[in-house]
Amino acid sequence: MELRVIGCHGGETPKHRTSAFILDERLAIDAGSLTSGLEVEGQLKLEGCLVSHAHLDHIRDLATLADNRCQMGAPPLIVAGTRETIRILRQHFFNNELWPDFATIPTPDNPTIRYLELSPENPAPLAGCNVRAIMVSHTIESAAFVIETPGGAIAYSGDTGPTDRLWQVLDEQPNLRALLMEVSFPNREQRLATVSGHHTPQTLRADLKKLRRPQDLPTLLYHIKPVFQAEVERECAALEGVSLEVMKIGDQFLL
Ligand SMILES: Nc1ncnc2c1ncn2[C@@H]1O[C@@H]2COP(=O)(O)O[C@H]2[C@H]1O
């Protein structure tokens, strides 16, 4: 399993890109920087895109991705998420006002994107994988995904603060190679993290400790706010009993 990091930050500057990852060149996980960080050739290879939640920093490049793929006559891209996420995409994003409705363009029978509604906890096939949504805890509906491939499984959490169900599911998941996990603010910004539904290093550690053996799960961190990058990295490096690595743009992991 090859994981590519296209964007892994909770904000944007010329050196920071919003969340987007690619598994085995076929499956995108969130779409924050899928066109700003990926050449057209890579954009064309995608078969599906998992969308954890509908906040702009996780969906915005779906707009330019759809436009590019439509012009190239690409097959429909499967955009998968939970019911509320798909509703927001339809109603507020691809709504023929903010952006054209690429679920009916160029034709309703052969559109640029097709939506796949994921029912929480129920696996569905997508881009050669089996994907399962698990609800996490953010300011709007947000999901984690367990993604099973023939070569093993990974998990990805969308934006979340402290949550419970995810850790039970991961404890039971065989062949789990890694967890891609959010951490956003430093400990001194705990109030902001709490109101905006995010982790600080201290709440992240407390949540990971809900696993039976957190030290055995490689935990790849993303979504640090650019303004706080160095401080959050320092605080994460000081955490014990967990196995953390902060992801960087351009990282490639063979899992
Ligand atoms: N109450 C708040 N006060 C300040 N910033 C906020 C508040 N709620 C949300 N935000 C910011 O808005 C951002 C929206 O995307 P995120 O959830 O990644 O992170 C959120 C915070 O950085």
Image (cartoon, grey):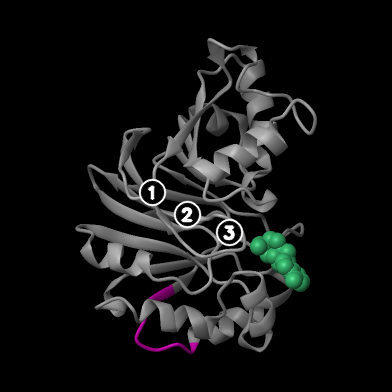
Magenta segment includes 31: no
Relative image position of residue 1 (x, y in whole percent) = 32, 47
Judge depth for marks 2 and 3 and give the one in front: 2
Q: Are marks 1 and 2 in contact (CB under 8 Å)?
A: yes
Q: Residues within 10 Å of mark 3 (few under 14, many from 20)?
A: many
Name the image quarter holding residue 12.
Answer: bottom right
- The answer, for residue 217, to whether it is visible in the render is yes
Q: Is mark 1 within 8 Å of ligand 1?
A: no
Question: In percent of the image, x 73 and y 24: which residue is there?
Answer: 100
Is the CB of mark 2 within 8 Å of ligand 1? no
Magenta segment, prevailing SS (helix, strand or loop): loop
Magenta includes 239? yes
Residue to which mark 1 is pinned: 120
Q: Which residue is mark 2?
A: 143
Amino acid type at circle 3 is: Cys
Residue 64, how many percent across, how many down? 70, 32
Pointers 3 and 1 in contact (C-beta within 8 Å) = no
Q: Which mark is residue 8?
A: 3
Are there few (<14), some (14-19), or many (20+) residues within 10 Å of tag 1? Answer: some
Say whether disc 1 or disc 2 marks the residue closer to the N-terminus: 1
Secondary structure at badge 3 equals: loop
Helix, strand or loop for disc 2: strand
- The front one of 160 and 121 is 121
Q: Name which residue lies at 75% across and 25% down.
A: 96
